């Protein structure tokens, strides 16, 4: 028996040793593959810009991306970072060996401000005199917006266009909850704060309809203006085309001037050869984006601007990759505050909001940075709404896009009473003993009395007042003005500028330049935050939540946002500062 246990122990030790040897070999391979030499670009090369995935503000480098054994889905779900994309196109603009860009946007997923920003970047590239040829099998409204920056837009003969105007459809759950016997207990401040509306109504409130209509009209107007200008047609004619669905068929899209021709892939190669001045197809050199792209890298040691990317939902605790964890970001900002070489801070906000408590943690650290007379400049992306605007409020100067969804200054809280569901549908009942009348305060297994509702209502109202005061102080606006533009209402960037919620239109580069101006040092380098995870942290994260999220997203497709919304409301705790919807025209 003793020999048996010795053998078992030896096998276990051997397996563990083998595992760690294998792991370190994989680490070496992954690290080695990440150190590949930069691609040599030959004369008359064409940058192949395939934007067939999600565009995020920034993509944190994943040490596992070059070794898919750890997770085969990594390469399939890799994002493109907007600011890496910008720097890459700027590099191509100055590169004498790059003759032009071959643009492909099928499958792009991006927010409205991001789409407009990509178009502006491409239009700037064309100032070099180099060409852009766009080719697509089928175009969404978002992909078409980007494609209009090209000199020529070609589509596969059997492709199609989806130009139909903007709309927003909301699913309402109240009827389902009534049938199930689930009572939502909802508390909110601001009549436009419609995030909880799907659980307390069966259709849009008049306030929500007003704000949604105004927002869509504003952004749609910007879209029509941009496309019409690029395609050299009137806004009235473009609106007529969309209203009558004239562009759905590829051949008709050519006739009415929205695209320049129908071609197969081999014909596109001929077009690219012609533009690059090549005679033989074997001389056609396409340089892939991933082989050419520029990475955002920290400046060398010395005085610097700290550029912090805050993208995703705002959540309590550390948060997962793609989220703004209140604790994690507070720690990062504390580190920045204590770094004597940081002379200015830029916060890139791209968030629909979330936990009011997490937002407050981040706000506090920003206020401490501001107290040290370190200038803070905010750059807002697709969204800086609710909690996203909460953390923008301390900024000395705020930039946004004309289409940035801004504001939603309001607060809500929600719980579900499932007592009737369990009793009537499952035969489950609850009983309890208590040492105080409200020892079970917060339970979802019984109705709340008036005192409990009063306590939560007071908490929501107090958080709302705190939110408004932070906006008033940060933006130097009278409280009466803040109260009139708050109330949970979302605004476009155009309206936000008029109302004083932002200072100017501009991208991240303008925000960084402004930060250096306020710091009175235009020679500051840029350091980027948060920092990438270590190899082992990435392995742990990738095999837990992030892997699960990727799988769910792959299965649900277009319904993924609905799933996220439902799970979010199911898990919320405490007051929430979150906008009521996500607007995406690229899919």
Image (tube, helix red, strand yellow):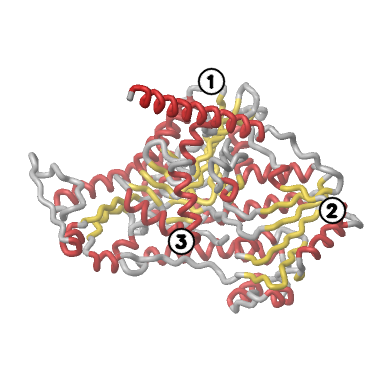
Residue 529 horizontal/vertical position (percent): 54, 33
Q: Earlier in the sequence, mark 1 or mark 3?
A: 1
Residue 99 horizontal/vertical position (percent): 83, 50
* Secondary structure type for disc 2: loop
Q: Is residue 155 left or right of residue 455?
A: right
Mark 1 touches mark 3? (CB < 8 Å): no
Q: Is residue 199 left or right of residue 382?
A: left
- Which residue is more in the foreground, 461 or 440? 440
- Which residue is more in the foreground, 578 or 137? 137
The alpha-carbon separation of the residues under discs 3 and 2 comes to: 40 Å
Within 10 Å of disc 1 (Cα), the crowding (few <14, some 14-19, many 20+) is: few
Q: How many marks?
A: 3
Q: Is residue 357 left or right of residue 227?
A: left
Instruction: Identify the residue shown where x is 52% and y is 22%.
Output: 339
Quadrant of the rendered image containing residue 264: bottom right
The alpha-carbon separation of the residues under discs 1 and 2 comes to: 51 Å
Instruction: Identify the residue shown where x is 65% and y is 34%.
Output: 34
- Residue receiving disc 3: 559
Q: Is residue 475 visible?
A: no
Indicate the quadrant containing the N terminus: top left, top right, bottom left or bottom right.
top left
Within 10 Å of disc 3 (Cα), the crowding (few <14, some 14-19, many 20+) is: few
- Residue receiving disc 2: 284
Residue 259 horizontal/vertical position (percent): 72, 69
Check residue 340 in the rendering and tell me which mark sits there, or answer none. 1
Indicate the quadrant containing the C terminus: top left, top right, bottom left or bottom right.
bottom right
* Secondary structure type for disc 1: loop
Residue 361 horizontal/vertical position (percent): 38, 35
- Which residue is more in the foreground, 294 or 499? 294
* Secondary structure type for disc 3: helix
Q: Earlier in the sequence, mark 3 or mark 2?
A: 2
């Amino acid at each position: 028996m003793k020999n048996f246990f010795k053998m078992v122990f030896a096998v276990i030790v051997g397996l563990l040793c083998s595992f760690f040897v294998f792991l370190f070999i994989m680490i070496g391979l992954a690290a080695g593959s990440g150190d590949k030499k930069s691609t040599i670009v030959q004369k008359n090369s064409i940058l192949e810009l395939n934007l067939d995935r999600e565009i995020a503000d920034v993509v944190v480098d994943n040490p596992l991306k070059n070794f898919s054994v750890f997770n085969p889905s990594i390469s399939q779900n890799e994002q493109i970072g907007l600011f890496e994309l910008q720097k890459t196109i700027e590099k191509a603009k100055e590169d004498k060996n790059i003759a032009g860009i071959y643009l492909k946007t099928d499958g792009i997923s991006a927010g409205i401000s991001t789409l407009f920003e990509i178009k502006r970047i491409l239009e700037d590239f064309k100032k070099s005199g180099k060409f852009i040829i766009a080719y697509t099998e089928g175009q969404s409204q978002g992909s078409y917006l980007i494609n209009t920056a090209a000199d020529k837009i070609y589509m596969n003969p059997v492709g199609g266009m989806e130009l139909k105007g903007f709309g927003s459809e909301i699913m309402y759950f109240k009827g389902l909850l009534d049938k199930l016997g689930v009572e939502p207990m909802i508390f909110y401040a601001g009549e436009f704060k419609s995030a909880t509306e799907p659980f307390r109504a069966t259709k849009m409130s008049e306030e929500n309809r007003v704000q949604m209509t105004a927002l869509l009209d504003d952004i749609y107007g910007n879209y029509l203006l941009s496309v019409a200008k690029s395609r050299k047609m009137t806004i009235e004619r473009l609106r007529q085309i969309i209203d009558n669905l004239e562009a759905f068929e590829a051949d008709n899209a050519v006739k009415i001037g929205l695209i320049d021709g129908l071609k197969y892939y081999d014909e596109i190669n001929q077009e690219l050869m012609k533009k690059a001045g090549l005679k033989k197809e074997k001389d056609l050199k396409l340089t892939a984006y991933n082989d050419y792209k520029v990475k955002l890298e920290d400046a060398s040691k010395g005085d610097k601007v700290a550029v912090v990317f805050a993208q995703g939902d705002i959540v309590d605790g550390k948060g997962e990759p793609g989220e703004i964890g209140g604790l994690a970001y507070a720690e990062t900002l504390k580190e920045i505050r204590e770094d004597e070489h940081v002379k200015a801070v830029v916060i890139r906000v791209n968030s629909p909001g979330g936990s009011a408590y997490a937002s407050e943690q981040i706000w506090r650290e920003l206020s401490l940075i501001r107290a040290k007379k370190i200038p803070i400049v905010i750059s807002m992306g697709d969204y800086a709404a609710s909690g996203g605007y909460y953390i923008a409020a301390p900024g000395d100067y705020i930039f946004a896009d004309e289409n940035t969804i801004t504001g939603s200054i309001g607060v809500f809280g929600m719980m579900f009473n499932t007592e009737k569901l369990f009793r009537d549908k499952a035969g489950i009942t609850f009983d309890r003993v208590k040492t105080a009348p409200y020892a079970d305060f917060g339970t979802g297994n019984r109705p709340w009395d008036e005192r409990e509702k009063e306590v939560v209502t007071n908490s929501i109202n107090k958080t709302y007042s705190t939110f408004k005061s932070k906006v008033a102080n940060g933006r130097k606006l009278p409280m009466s003005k803040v109260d009139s533009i708050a109330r949970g209402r979302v605004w476009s960037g155009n309206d936000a500028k008029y109302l004083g919620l932002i200072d100017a239109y501009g991208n991240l580069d303008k925000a960084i330049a402004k930060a250096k101006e306020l710091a009175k040092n235009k020679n500051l380098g840029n350091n980027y935050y948060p920092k990438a995870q270590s190899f082992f942290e990435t392995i742990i994260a990738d095999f837990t939540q992030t892997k699960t999220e990727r799988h769910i997203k792959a299965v649900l497709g277009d319904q993924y946002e609905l799933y996220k919304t439902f799970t979010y409301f199911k898990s919320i705790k405490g007051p929430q500062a979150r906008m009521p919807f996500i607007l995406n025209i690229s899919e």
